[in-house]
Amino acid sequence: MLTILACCAAMLLLTASTHYEALKLLNAALPPLPIPGRLRLLVLLIAVFAAHVLEMLIYALAYHLLPRLADVGTLSNGAAASFASCLYFSAETFTSLGFGDVTPGGPLRLLAGMEALNGLLLIGWSASYIHLAMERFWPVTGWPQGTATRSGSRARSAARGRCTSGAVAMAAARDATGCSCSAVFGRRHRRAMPRPNSEASASPLTPDAAHRSSRRSPC
């Protein structure tokens, strides 16, 4: 049982690393190609298909060697299956097709289940990468390539310019009045507050208080 678990972990790491390196190579090799964008997508599809075939071959090799070397199960009623049968079983398991004409036995069934899950994840990974590549290399209908990106950049630059001009205008108004926004807002709040109805508040200012009030800042 430990042998098949170690083999499952090794297969997951090996196929995921293979797929990662294939997509990394495509990401670096596709943009410099001197071909139209749609042909680049065709090259991408062929390369992704080849990567999946390589991953199926890795699992097929495991199905072919494990029954002979580690005695962890068999394919097809206890008989040692040929490599062609192992490749066929790996392909139908990787794609979750599952005809059922070739079946695993013993602990090898766990590896088959892990391959089905691994294949689902890797195929989804490829689909998301192809979608991103289509947005990159396939222009929108009626637009030249890159127009949407340039228009979005212009809109963001215009928005930043409006924000900057608004901040400059506020700073200029603050410098012209000679007081800060907090002082202005505080003055507004002080004006809005009700004054106490008392004789002290209604009393006229003394000459000294009037002189100090005249020298006070407008803020």
Image (cartoon, rainbow, N blue to C red):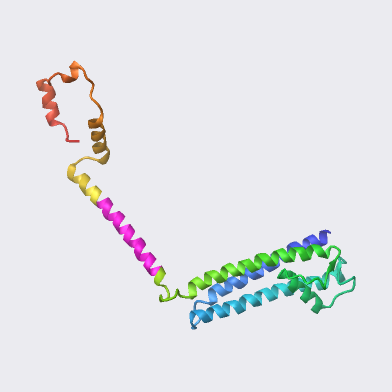
Q: Is residue 76 left or right of residue 7?
A: right
Residue at (16% x, 20% y) in the render: 202
Residue at (26% x, 33% y) in the render: 189
Q: Which residues are magenta?
A: 149-168
> In which quadrant of the rendered image does the C terminus lie?
top left
Q: Relative to 4, does residue 174 appear above or below in the rendering? A: above
Total numbered badges shown on the rendered structure: 0
> In which quadrant of the rendered image does the N terminus lie?
bottom right
Dominant secondary structure of the magenta stretch?
helix
Q: Is residue 80 left or right of residue 187?
A: right
Residue 90 in picture, x, y percent from top left: 76, 72
Residue 146 in picture, x, y percent from top left: 42, 73
Decide whether residue 163 is among the magenta residues.
Answer: yes
Identify which residue, 140 or 204, lies in the foreground: 140
Identify which residue, 103 or 178, lies in the foreground: 103
Residue at (90% x, 70% y) in the render: 78
Q: Is residue 159 left or right of residue 39?
A: left
Decide whether residue 100 is among the magenta residues.
Answer: no
